[in-house]
Amino acid sequence: MPSPKPLVTHIYTADPSAHVFDGKLYIYPSHDRENSQVERDNTGEQYDMVDYHVLSMDTVGGSVTDHGIALSVEQVSWAAKQLWAPDAACKNGKYYLYFPARDKEKIFRIGVAVSDVPSGPFKAEPQPIPGSYSIDPASFIDDDGNAYLYFGGIWGGELQCWTSGTFDASKTGPQEPTGDAPALFPRVAKLSDDMLSFPNGVEELQILDENGDLLKGKDHDRRFFEAPWMHKYNGMYYFSYSTGDTHCIAYATSTSPMGPFTYRGRILEPVVGWTTHHSIVEWEGRWWLFYHDCELSGGVSHLRSVKMRELLYDGEGRIRLAEPQ
Ligand code: FUB
């Protein structure tokens, strides 16, 4: 099977969050760079990103525009390093870039930056979103106008450090529930009308198995690891995510954006490289999966490239990928 080509090759890009704004496709990726950090599972130091670029396309298969630096770490007063997977949203004519970074105490938080245009540049709020933690924010605005932020990632993403409600540094690293204990679950928070805060706090987003039981810690083929994404198809909510150390993109469905969700299957099998991270968007009447792999860098896990593939649904709403053209 031919592998799709990277959307851009002049820079390394990862964690693509795609949205259609005014008919145009915008991608909000991480911007990978070469660095001399030592690879560590516990802190992910090798993912040493310092800025974001916004990419856009006018048509499927058309040229990709790099709009340059949209936000850099020195423009974020609370952030120290590691600008990881971002996402964007549009509400009331403003554009919001949500992004994780380690704060000055080296703890991951989630920030927001605002622009009048989808390509940026974005101006960061002076503090992270109050009550935010961990990584990988993904925004979703429902048909009724309610906006949500999904987030979280275990191991280097620190979600396991927050189970008591405050940061527990002793849980830093590749730690998670084992055996039949429930897995750790991603978080969801309703966003305020101004898109800058969590008025109702943060909740756990539960993922159940076919028997209605919470996914278990030992179930590394199916449990949530990082890279949350939400989309809606035919009135059904689809929550998709990376299974981390088993390297797949999986999905679960629900009749509510707050869950609980029921596991349905896999969207993407392992790609070249350790991480896998995606987004799903409808554009010009077709559905697209944006994802990354490390083919261009010859398998260097922190030097990734963004790609896209068409995604199809069967009559029961199950997802499958179209063969690359
Ligand atoms: O890009 C850094 C991290 O790698 C992301 O936040 C994770 O989802 C993984 O892709």
Image (cartoon, rainbow, N blue to C red):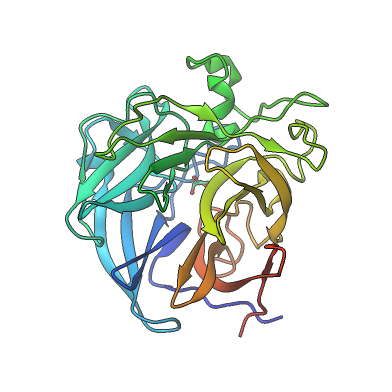
Q: Residue shown at 80%/43% (left/top)?
A: 210
Give the percent coordinates (x, y) of residue 194: 24, 39
Q: Is residue 124 above or below residue 216?
A: below
Give the percent coordinates (x, y) of residue 234: 57, 62
* Side of 170 relative to 262 (left or right): left
Q: Which image quadrant for residue 224?
A: top right
Q: Disc count in the image?
A: 0
Q: Is residue 12 above or below residue 227?
A: below
Q: Residue shown at 48%/77% (left/top)?
A: 285
Q: Is residue 152 above or below residue 97?
A: above
Quadrant containing the C terminus in the rendered view: bottom right
* Side of 169 relative to 21 (left or right): right
Q: Residue shown at 35%/44% (left/top)?
A: 98
Give the percent coordinates (x, y) of residue 22: 28, 69
Give the percent coordinates (x, y) of residue 79: 30, 33
Quadrant containing the N terminus in the rendered view: bottom right
Q: Is residue 279 above or below residue 254?
A: below
